[in-house]
Image (cartoon, rainbow, N blue to C red):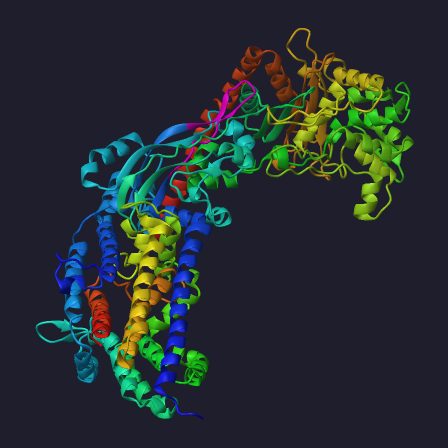
């Protein structure tokens, strides 16, 4: 921690190591967006940079919020988001072939984004309220399952499978860490595996196609398998050190679709090679380690589970996007925050990090006070 | 079960945190491993894919290799012509452009339909052919209006040109646009390039790998949507190899002209090397018109002709050898110990079994020399009965009749039959009879030979070497074994053949007009129709006998051998021998041979080219008149 007489105390108390890491990732992302636009800060890098500064500031403000306040607003905020999700499904207009936006007249809100941190906090709050002795009973299971299932179901209905899966993942991680007996994971896990063919049957046409293509991308190299094929070509042709800044042919000649959004990592790996790609993965891993460190060091059960849940949100962004881009998972529209162009992912990540920073600050100050 | 306490919950939390942290670390590790797999292990594969995305190749077809004769005279070359192509990517208004081009170039509705179709299916920068072989005036008309025709690319291309036209038609064949099946079989992108021609027949087809060359390319960088980004350094094309033939182009053309309007084939060989100097089958089509796509009328004219100009008679025509078989037969007799001075009386025929075989004449007392000289059948019938037919026929086959020449680069080769008792047993399951010997010894019955064999047989007799006919001058030369007979026996046969032309023989009218050079030869007349009485001059061309002549010269120090067949030419001495005489003369004194040709061509009504032009004009006029009459009939 930096401490000096010159730097004011509130500023010095910020977790600079994390801010530095996040800024480094975002900076690399901006350089990549500059390249993806053919060597121009317009239209993406400039907007993304502004969004980053804005939401980093938001995160710093969030870090000032006390744990008690977070605890108090968790349930109302969660319920409000569920209501908004219902409204979105009912009233939301069709954008990108899916109903994901809630138009409030002034701004368009994507409630599913807010649900990602909210589900982590909500489940943490639930297990915080649950008496320790009940953790092995069914009472520890069904409310949690409902708390996850309702918003996740509403999101999948939009339809937005990727976000729905992320909400489930964050929720289930909190359940796992709360101490729910392992059989509650193993039995439904097995049942789910058995249900996969049936779920597959009920998937939307485009979702089902994405899974088909994932299982055999070469079956349709110019059609729906095009994304995965071109992404693998971009990464594979980058080699160890890449083709050089502004030299990526896959992205610059538009063979790589969505080269600035969902597949921005492929653009990056093409120009910076395996070395550049691995640096991004390493930076993310360090961020995740910091987050898990906060979770492990938290003194209250609510803080502990919240931190772990928020970390799970960050991790699921990272894992789903990179597994997809490298051809290890089907195409689901999950961006890589800070690297992919798009303000909402930056916002969600910064909300998560802001809350984590808040818990971390209270750990330090709290321990000092007690 | 004990109650779960807060402390226990903390313990479970830390344990499970380890699991979660470990899982996250494992996923990150797997991702780095995956990057390594894609970017390092599979790097070559993806580099290639990325390059093939980035770079498109506009194929520049290579220039086809020339075919030249033994003296480097051109047999097949490339003539520059004008062509017009369309670059689909740059065309603004497809319908208007095609309509205007159709007007300027006078395109047929079929062509317009093809262009529209190809334009719709075209992929970005690969040009679509509009027209080739465009006359200069039309080409100029397109060039003038280029500013209003974006995407139209007038250029100079190359088309195949055969200076000697029909004279080399059956030798070199012709080239043509690759068919859809050709492309399906090879998947060669070159085949889709406008203006590319591949060998379709003859040497053009068999020598395709040498003649084609390597295509070059203009490499361009394009975006996924097909927009040109920049041009990269071009890859130069490599022209096809020049192929040098053993052919003497002057002789080839001379022979073709000397044949006149007759239907026949002639092969000339160098007797020491087996080099084929002339390979002529007449009449023939003009390979130049095949190369630029043959017209319907011309095709009809060629396919309706009873002289079958589309058939390569050298390699695919089979004929009874007639009496040309006799020198080879005689050598077979000698090998079996027949005394050449044994005399046999020819009373005008011979009874074999219950059938009387009639000779051409009453020759009286004949020995081997005079029997070859005068072509006495009775001598050969009688000797055939005294010797072993298996050994005799084997000698004839050994000298080339019925032999396949696998080294020749021919698309098809029909090699006929030289019958023998063994062959007959196998093929027809019957014993060799006296009349089989009789028929075979005068080259009738089952005997069928092609014109190549007609030249190889006298060539082997003349040089005493077991030569193989060759067409490629630079192909490796194999050692040539000597003919396995007593050289004195060969001398006896050669002298008899010399007497055929220079003594009191059947072809004395065809002595070479050159001092000190004697030609040796043997006539042959092959019955086409068994029922027709010999010597009856039949007015029906298709029923007349084939005339054959085999020869070599000079008789004392042989250098060249010629085999010739004139279909339905009648008696060998009258139709085939004069053609051979003039062709042989050409080899020693071209000027004298040309002098002999001129009066003949005047008599026939012009040179080969002039007569061909006149004939096709007449055919076209007749076809048009017929069409007009039909139209008049329907309208009336």
Q: Which residues are magenta?
A: B59-78
Q: Nearer the viewer, residue B86 or A78?
A: A78
Above/below status of B585 relative to B316: above
Q: How many marks?
A: 0
Q: Quadrant of the N terminus of chain B?
A: bottom left
Above/below status of A22 relative to B585: below
Q: Nearer the viewer, residue A78 or B539?
A: A78
Above/below status of B31 relative to A126: above
Q: Nearer the viewer, residue B484 or B417?
A: B484
Outermost residue toward the left in this view: A106
Q: Quadrant of residue B102?
A: top left
Relative image position of residue B162 (x, y in whole percent): 47, 28
Above/below status of B31 relative to A254: below
- Asked whether B63 falls inside the magenta stretch, the response is yes
Outermost residue toward the top in this view: B515
Q: Quadrant of residue B405?
A: top right
* Horizontal side, residue B513 vs residue B301: left or right: right
* Horizontal side, residue A151 vs residue B313: left or right: left
Q: Nearer the viewer, residue B591 or B373?
A: B591
Any part of residue B358 in sight: no
Any part of residue A252 in sight: yes
Relative image position of residue B228 (x, y in whole percent): 27, 44
Relative image position of residue A168 (x, y in whole percent): 32, 78
- Asked whether A351 falls inside the magenta stretch, the response is no
Relative image position of residue B456 (x, y in whole percent): 70, 26
Q: Which residue is pictured at 18% across the width and 40% down the height? A: B148
């Amino acid at each position: 921690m930096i401490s000096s007489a010159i730097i004011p105390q509130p500023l010095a108390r910020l977790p600079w190591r994390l801010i530095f890491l996040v800024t480094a990732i975002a900076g690399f992302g901006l350089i990549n967006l500059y390249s993806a636009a053919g060597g121009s800060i317009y239209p993406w890098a400039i907007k993304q940079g502004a969004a980053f500064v804005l939401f980093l500031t938001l995160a710093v403000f969030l870090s000032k919020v006390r744990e008690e306040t977070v605890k108090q607003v968790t349930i109302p905020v969660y319920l409000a988001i569920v209501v908004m999700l219902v409204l979105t499904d009912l009233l939301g207009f069709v954008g990108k072939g899916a109903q994901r936006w809630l138009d409030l007249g002034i701004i368009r809100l994507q409630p599913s984004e807010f649900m990602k941190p909210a589900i982590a906090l909500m489940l943490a709050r639930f297990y915080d309220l649950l008496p320790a002795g009940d953790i092995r009973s069914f009472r520890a299971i069904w409310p949690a399952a409902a708390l996850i299932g309702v918003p996740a179901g509403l999101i999948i209905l939009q339809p937005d499978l990727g976000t729905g899966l992320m909400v489930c993942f964050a929720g289930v991680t909190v359940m796992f860490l709360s101490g729910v007996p392992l059989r509650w994971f193993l039995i439904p896990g097995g049942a789910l595996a058995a249900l996969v063919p049936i779920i597959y049957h009920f998937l939307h046409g485009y979702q089902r196609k994405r899974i088909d293509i994932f299982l055999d991308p070469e079956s349709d190299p110019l059609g729906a398998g095009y994304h995965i094929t071109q992404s693998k070509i971009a990464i594979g042709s980058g080699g160890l050190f890449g083709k050089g800044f502004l030299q990526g042919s896959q992205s610059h000649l538009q063979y790589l679709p969505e080269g600035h959004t969902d597949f921005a990592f492929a653009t990056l790996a093409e120009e910076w090679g395996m070395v550049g790609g691995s640096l991004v993965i390493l930076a993310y891993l360090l961020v995740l380690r910091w987050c898990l460190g906060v979770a492990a060091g938290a003194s209250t059960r609510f803080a502990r589970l919240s931190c772990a849940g928020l970390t799970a949100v960050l991790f699921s962004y990272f894992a789903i996007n990179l597994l997809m881009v490298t051809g290890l998972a089907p195409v689901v529209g999950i961006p890589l925050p800070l690297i992919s162009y798009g303000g909402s992912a930056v916002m969600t990540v910064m909300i998560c990090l802001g809350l984590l920073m808040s818990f971390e600050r209270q750990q330090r100050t709290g321990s000092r006070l007690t | 079960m004990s109650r779960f306490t807060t402390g226990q919950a903390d313990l479970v939390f830390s344990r499970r945190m380890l699991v979660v942290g470990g899982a996250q670390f494992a996923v990150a590790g797997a991702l780095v491993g995956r990057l390594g797999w894609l970017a390092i292990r599979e790097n070559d594969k993806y580099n290639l894919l990325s390059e093939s995305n980035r770079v498109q190749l506009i194929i520049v077809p290579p220039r086809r290799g020339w075919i030249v004769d033994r003296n480097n005279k051109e047999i097949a070359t490339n003539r520059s012509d004008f062509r017009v192509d369309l670059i689909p990517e740059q065309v603004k208004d497809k319908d208007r452009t095609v309509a205007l081009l159709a007007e300027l170039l006078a395109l047929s509705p079929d062509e317009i339909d093809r262009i529209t179709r190809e334009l719709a299916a075209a992929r970005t920068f690969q040009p679509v052919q509009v027209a080739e072989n465009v006359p200069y005036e039309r080409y100029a008309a397109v060039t003038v209006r280029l500013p209003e025709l974006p995407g139209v690319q007038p250029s100079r291309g190359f088309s195949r040109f055969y200076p000697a036209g029909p004279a080399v038609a059956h030798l070199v064949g012709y080239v043509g646009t690759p068919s859809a099946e050709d492309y399906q079989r090879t998947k060669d992108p070159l085949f889709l390039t406008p203006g590319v021609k591949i060998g379709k027949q003859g040497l053009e087809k068999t020598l395709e790998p040498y003649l084609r060359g390597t295509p070059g390319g203009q490499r361009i960088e394009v975006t996924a949507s097909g927009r040109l980004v920049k041009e990269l350094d071009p890859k130069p094309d490599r022209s096809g190899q020049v192929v040098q033939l053993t052919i003497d182009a002057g002789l080839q053309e001379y022979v073709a002209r000397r044949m006149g309007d007759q239907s026949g084939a002639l092969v000339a060989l160098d007797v020491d090397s087996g080099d084929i100097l002339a390979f002529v089958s007449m009449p023939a089509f003009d390979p130049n018109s095949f190369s630029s796509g043959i017209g319907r009328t011309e095709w009809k004219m060629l396919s309706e002709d009873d002289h079958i100009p589309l058939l390569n008679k050298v390699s695919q025509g089979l004929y009874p050898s007639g009496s040309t078989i006799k020198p080879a037969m005689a050598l077979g007799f000698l090998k079996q110990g027949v005394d050449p001075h044994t005399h046999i009386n020819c009373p005008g025929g011979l009874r074999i079994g219950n059938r009387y075989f009639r000779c051409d004449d009453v020759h009286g007392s004949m020995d081997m020399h005079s029997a070859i000289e005068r072509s006495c059948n009775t001598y050969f019938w009688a000797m055939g009965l005294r010797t072993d037919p298996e050994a005799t026929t084997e000698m004839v086959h050994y000298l080339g009749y019925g032999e396949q020449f696998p080294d020749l680069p021919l698309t098809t080769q029909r090699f006929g039959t030289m019958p023998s008792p063994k062959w007959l047993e196998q093929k027809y399951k019957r014993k060799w009879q006296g009349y089989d010997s009789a028929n075979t010894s005068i080259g009738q019955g089952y005997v069928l030979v092609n014109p190549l064999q007609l030249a190889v047989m006298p060539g082997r007799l003349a040089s005493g070497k077991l030569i193989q006919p060759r067409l490629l001058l630079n192909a490796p030369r194999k050692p040539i074994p000597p003919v396995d007979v007593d050289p004195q026996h060969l001398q006896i046969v050669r002298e008899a053949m010399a007497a055929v032309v220079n003594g009191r023989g059947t072809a004395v009218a065809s002595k070479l007009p050159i001092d000190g050079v004697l030609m040796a030869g043997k006539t042959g007349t092959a019955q086409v129709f068994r029922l027709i009485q010999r010597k009856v001059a039949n007015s029906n061309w298709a029923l007349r006998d084939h005339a054959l002549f085999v020869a070599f010269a000079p008789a004392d120090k042989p250098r060249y051998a010629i085999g010739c067949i004139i279909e339905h030419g009648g008696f060998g001495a009258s139709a085939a021998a004069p053609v051979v005489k003039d062709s042989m003369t050409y080899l020693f004194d071209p000027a004298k041979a040309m002098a002999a040709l001129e009066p003949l061509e005047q008599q026939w009504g012009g040179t080969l080219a002039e007569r061909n032009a006149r004939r096709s004009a007449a055919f076209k006029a007749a076809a048009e008149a017929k069409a007009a009459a039909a139209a008049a009939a329907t309208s009336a």
